[in-house]
Amino acid sequence: MTKHIGAHVSASGGVFNAITNAVAIGADAFALFTRNQRAWVSKPLDEAETGKFKRLMQEHNFAPEQVLPHDSYLINLGSPDPETLEKSRNAFLDEMRRAQQLGLQMLNFHPGSHLNRISEEECLDQIAHEVNRALAQTEGVAAIIENTAGQGTNLGWKFEHIRRIIDGVEDKSRVGVCIDTCHTLAAGYDLSTELGYESCMEEFDHIIGLGYLRAVHLNDSKKGAGSHVDRHETLGNGTLGEEFFRRFMHDPRFDGMPIILETPDPTRWQAEIGWLRSL
Ligand code: ZN
Ligand code: MN
Ligand code: MN
């Protein structure tokens, strides 16, 4: 098995453009927004658009496992506010349906925030409940929980949070986890040292289970371990450092899944992907 590496590329002008943008930087994986990530409602995908997306996927040899759509930043499935929750629920279902229409198998989402108005447990259980609702109305697409840095009242920075959400999801075959390496470090799991890396992976396996690991956001971090600040850095130039990326590239636990750069300078993506492969 091998590592599929790419970046979160632009889909402006049509979802199919993400594929050519990925090919242009030498990627064999990619992430994309399938709708305007800053609006609650988007126009539906039409058949011409989904048809072209599927054609280009075949033409450039992308399997669904190499593609990780990312949901809108507005969505908060853990929101204590009924109005925001309702909008989030509808938008999330729309995101899941779009992934399904495109023939994809995953949707990456940020778990949610309690806004200091409900307990962590209530918030996590609500997220699981909302995932169940969306799964019941779609087919074939798994909800992929991204771990967070724990900024503000964002949950999902502790592996125990993710475990609690998974516990509440009925269909375990359609829930998974995306590890964001910047978020992991910022959350307090110090991946920058060999010992820290190994104990983080062991903890992940022990608390969540490696079987749930489905994708990676591969970013360096501007801030230190435990800072709870989500600021991505170009690879090798942050607090994770070069050695981390070497260790990662030699770790077979990350084979066969999309590894997505969300590093701050898109003009460097091609070089960053090349550098990773050279390790
Ligand atoms: Zn994300
Ligand atoms: Mn991320
Ligand atoms: Mn981030």
Image (tube, helix red, strand yellow):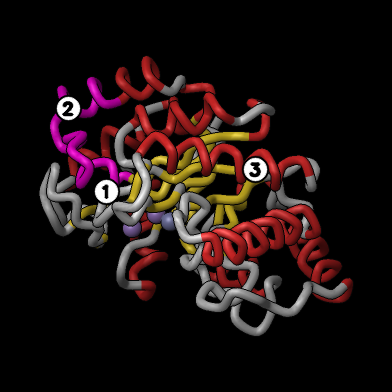
Q: Quadrant of ligand 3?
A: bottom left
Quadrant in the picture for residue 41 = bottom right
The image quadrant where one finds the N terminus is top right
Tell me which label, 2 or 3, sits earlier in the chain. Answer: 3
Tell me whether circle 2 and circle 3 mark residues in contact (CB < 8 Å).
Answer: no
- Furthest residue in direction bottom, as rendered: 13
Whether residue 272 is visible, yes or no, is yes
Circle 1 sits on which residue? Answer: 150
Circle 2 sits on which residue? Answer: 196
CA distance separating discs 1 and 2: 19 Å
Magenta range is 181-200
Quadrant in the picture for residue 143 = top right
Picture coordinates of residue 221 (x, y %)? 20, 54
Question: In the drawing, what numbered circle is on residue 128?
Answer: none
Picture coordinates of residue 106 (x, y %)? 64, 46
Considering only vertical position in the picture, is 259 above or below 11?
above
Tell me which label, 1 or 2, sits earlier in the chain. Answer: 1
Identify the residue shown where x is 21% and y is 34%: 189
